[in-house]
Image (cartoon, rainbow, N blue to C red):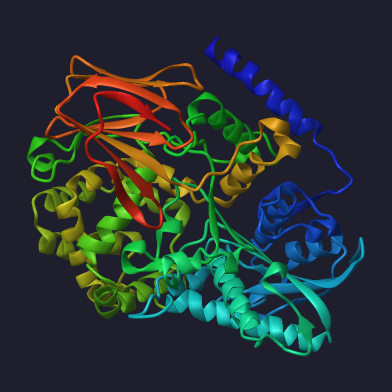
Amino acid sequence: MRFKFKLLLLLPILLQVSACSSPDKISFRNSDYVFDTYYNDSYFLLDNSVVHEEIALASHAMALSTFNKNPDYSKRIEFAHELWLNEKFENIWFNESMVEKPTTDSIGYGIASKHIALEGQDFNLIAVAVRGGYYEGEWANNVTIGEEGNAIGFDGASDTVIDGIMNYIDRYKLTGHTKLWISGFSRAAITSNLTAGKIIDKISNNLFLPGVVSMSNNDIYAYCFEPPMGLVMDFEEARSDKYHGIHNFINFNDPVPLVAPREWGFTRYGVDHYYPDRLTDIFFDATEREKMISLYHFTYGGEKFPKYSVDDWKFFDVGEEYAAPDNRPRESINPSQGRFCHALIETLAIYAFMNRQMYAAACQTGLRALLEAAMGLNPKIEKINFSNIFKVIFEYEFIQTLIYELLGDSSYEFAYDVSMLLYQIFGANEDNFKEIEELYNLNFYMFIFFGAGFQYRKDILTQLLYRDNAMGIVIGHMPELSYAFLSSTDSRFLGDRACKFNDGSYYTLHVNNPHSFKIYEKQLKKDIFEYKDDVMSSDCISAEKLADGSLSIYLPKNGQYEYIGDFGGLALSDVDQIYGTRLVSENLPFSGQIN
């Protein structure tokens, strides 16, 4: 009966999807799947400072068209080339890295262009698609941070793309008013982000092919999906209007956009747009979750996608011994995968590696070598079959010993014993044993730092090593999930019921010494949280009871709240994904409103 009821709820969504048609509609291929998207030249007459669903979906399609796992590297440009032909682009060109086996520091991208004359405007449109999947050895470049300045790996990749764009303009003799459209997913997203930001800086200083092309920051359309961070710049400056044409689209439950970490001073250019989530949208559990899931499962190839419910995180009580010293959570309702991801990255950045310089000096070389071997660039070690890696890790009985060592503050024992796991994952034999041993030795201090971080946050370790939680984190970064989430914000799929973006911020309401507490939400017209007889209850709000008995309640900013309670103290904080946590009020009255 419950299934039938949910199907009835989804019926309007399915009808919208099946009825979705337009003369701009085209299909494109992405690895094993086929998706629908839209394209029209008129999109690029629109104001670049505003997110336009037309450009957003076309941008994501362009980014995903670079995903190709054909064993013949010379054919990996096929999907992007096909998409551009369907969109009537010309002068289609790809760099050598798109048709060769990727190396540790390569970056693949393609460029196409067309001349557009519409509504009195006349300009060249240059489209740049940066490869964001099946880039194999480039994984080593993702962890190449360096000791100062922008993250070296991403920074170098963006410089390569900028040089390619400038050479392309010269090669095809483009002149006059020119607009740039660039997109990428994950590694390609931060590369696109940095490329766009640097080009805007060049334009501002009249250094981008002056006298050849005419371009302003109003001509940059950069749409970046699930981008990591790689820019070192004052946070306020990076978000300034100067970079208003750069748009970043983020799943709050995805850890990839959190690295390189904010705690080390990293950020990205432009504006971040977050998809709905329980912490950032009060309507998430009421309506938005079903819309997002429907577009994930009811699409071409959807039956092949992993089962995913957007945010179904499992919480485990770490126990009084580990929770009490630092007042960690002992109970949780509707726990958030996103909050866990933030805590995990913070733990690694501050308590494991401690700072950027320590990471670069002690860990970066070894981790690069480890990823090179995993991706098949070490001739003595066979490439890892990543479809089996989680099975190896979570069914390997020695993992239990490693967990006990971390819980018992035995980081050196953990670091020594993890070698057994490494031998298992890489399939050690007499031919490769010495090479795997060398990999282990290169990463010995990283394993020690890793263990030390989890000794400080044993509650994080407890949540991470549950199989479903770990798989939820992996799925949270899937490109197909990202495309479905973006589709849920598109009126062509959901009409005026389309999901809305937010800025990723939320409130934390901290209740000291609670006896009773209740929150009413005006738009939903119901009580959304209650604490009574030492029990928390809510069907939509995430909350935790800490070791000292206090409560932390997480409130989306688009809610309209009334609260009342009997407690010892009430404080409100604002949590921003770039700037961190800021105290708003440390002594709220016993009843009131939060808007």
Tell me what residue is drawn at x 64 percent, y 85 percent. Answer: 163
Farthest-out residue, top: 1
Residue 296 in the image: above or below residue 526: below
In the image, residue 380 above or below residue 210:
above
**Residue drawn at the location 12% of the way across and 52% of the way down:** 405
Q: Is residue 372 left or right of residue 500?
A: left
- For the image, the number of numbered tags is 0
| Res 140 quadrant in image | bottom left
- Looking at the picture, does residue 164 appear above or below residue 55? below
Is residue 278 shown left or right of residue 126? left
Q: Horizontal and vertical percent for residue 398?
A: 21, 51
Residue 441, horizontal then vertical, whole percent: 22, 75
Judge by depth and name the residue closer to the eye, 241 or 423. 241
Residue 460: x, y in percent?
24, 47
* Picture quadrant where residue 319 is located: top left
Give 287 or 216, whichever is nearer the viewer: 216
From the image, which quarter does the N terminus lie in?
Answer: top right
* Residue 141 appears in the rendering: yes
Residue 524 picture location, percent across and down: 50, 20
Q: Residue at x 57, y 68 (%)?
A: 193
Does residue 76 appear anywhere in the picture? no
Could you say which is closer to the camera, residue 403 or residue 433?
403
Q: Nearer the viewer, residue 110 or 545?
A: 545
Place residue 545 in its image quadrant: top left
The quarter of the image holding the C terminus is: top left
